[in-house]
Amino acid sequence: MEWFTADSYWLSRLVFQRVLAALYLLAFLGAALQFRALIGARGMLPVPRYVADVPFRRAPSVFHFHYSDRFFALCAWGGCAVAAALLAGVDGLLPLWAAMLLWLVPWALYLSIVNVGQTWYGFGWESLLLEVGFLAVLFAGDDVGPPVLVLFLLRWVLFRVEFGAGLIKMRGDACWRKLTCLYFHHETQPMPGPLSWFFHRLPRPLHRVETAANHVTQLAVPFLLFTPQPIATGAALLMAATQLWLVLSGNFSWLNWLTIALALSAVDFRRLFGDAAAPPADLASPPLWYEVLVIAVTAGLLALSYRPARNLVSRRQIMNYSFDPLHLVNAYGAFGSVNRVRQEVVVEGTSDAVPRQDSDWREYEFKGKPGDVRRWPRQFAPYHLRLDWLMWFAGLSPAYARAWFGPFVERLLEGDRDTLRLLRHCPFPDRPPTYVRARLYRYRYTTWRELRETGACWERTYVREFLPPTRLGGGAPEA
């Protein structure tokens, strides 16, 4: 079937594959370094307890058959090794069927992790990585041209990511329709980056232009992905440029980079660079079994797309939701509402036998979330700091932290090494504190004048107690 492949997208596939492999590597690395404190056997939300309550059919995972911290580490580091091999281009040295199997390995391993990750893995970019990773299996192999149907499916994913995000904004917070959301967003986003303070201090008319441009990119431009070239290439490059703007303005894990990878898969590089981007002359014709497989899987994924497509046009649109346990076709969206005020949970400990207001309370510092008002935010994305992100949700409402915050405090009181590794600084290096408390503060960016005078990028005001002084055993403070 001559229509089956589009050889001119050979370089597009190669770029897409390498970016995806790098993101797989970061995802597995984060899992390997953070899992013991979060979902390990002694973690805040242990995997063994979860798989005992949730059947395999609802959350398919190899950890239903066996779990130990050593086995999880083997899967995570094994995923790193496979991702590194894919990044190095090992798949290009294999026959088509073997390359497909190699791409299937990280997808199956990461699916197993996400499906037992619970709250720590409840982010839209987890499902996006799995959906795109599954399509990458069909996209494997350098000896045949990229299948047209897979190129279409990747554009369908990109369309849902962008258009879904645009719709959830227009249906959600009124500030998106008034073009005023960016008055607040850069200050109140989950994890600001090193440039977020400067983005926040841009003139308000420019914020309105940013918001309007965002609406155009998310609500109009996605339809151009399905138009002939070079229009589709222009639309994809515009989306990629918008995502780079978001990369500069905040820390959103690998969401922006994976969206860029999707956009690059729609770019016809040969139109841009001529023969320099030409495919190899020895591309083989795809075997019949491969054509049948791609057509069958495409038909199945389009059938599964019914619910995500219906969600897009629904007045009750939901975002970042998986409609099947394999995360094959999902609903996406971001920031349907924007907070006007930033509230942060500050965790402190004391070694005093009796906790008083004037006790020697020392503050725990997190790697990414705001704490010390003089510490400038850092760039972590596309690496994902899971505890820091959940601490942002805790600041919105204690309900977001009900399942894990108590175990987190307990591990601080125990001086648990795996938990302390998730933090930037522990103020009790020799022995754990006697009491731990948490307080809620309102944070705001300083003005240019305040920054010059104090050197602080944040100013904070005490709001209320989040957790009273607590010790091991849960007993009341001594009189």
Image (cartoon, rainbow, N blue to C red):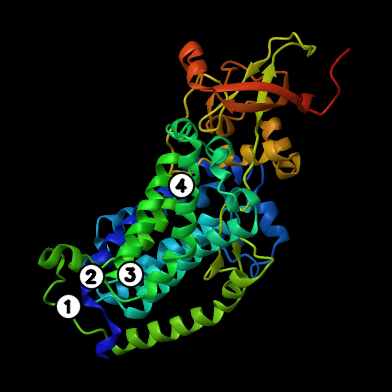
> Which kind of residue does numbered mark 1 sit on?
Leu
Q: Can you tell which of label 1 and label 4 is closer to the viewer?
A: 4
Question: Mark 1: few, some, or many residues within 10 Å (few <14, many ≥20)?
Answer: few
The image quadrant that residue 37 belongs to is top right
Tell me: residue 5, above or below residue 372: below
SS type, badge 3: helix
Task: Sort mark 4 into few (<14), some (14-19) or many (20+) by Cα contacts within 10 Å.
Answer: some
Q: Are marks 1 and 2 in contact (CB under 8 Å)?
A: yes
Q: Is residue 178 left or right of residue 94?
A: right
First reached walking from the N terminus: tag 1 or tag 4: 4
Mark 3 — residue?
232
Check the picture and name the quadrant holding the N terminus. bottom left
Q: Which mark is residue 210?
A: 4
Q: Which residue is mark 2?
A: 10
Circle nearer the N terminus (1, 3): 3
What numbered label is drawn on residue 283?
Answer: 1
Q: Position of residue 80 (x, y in %)?
A: 39, 51
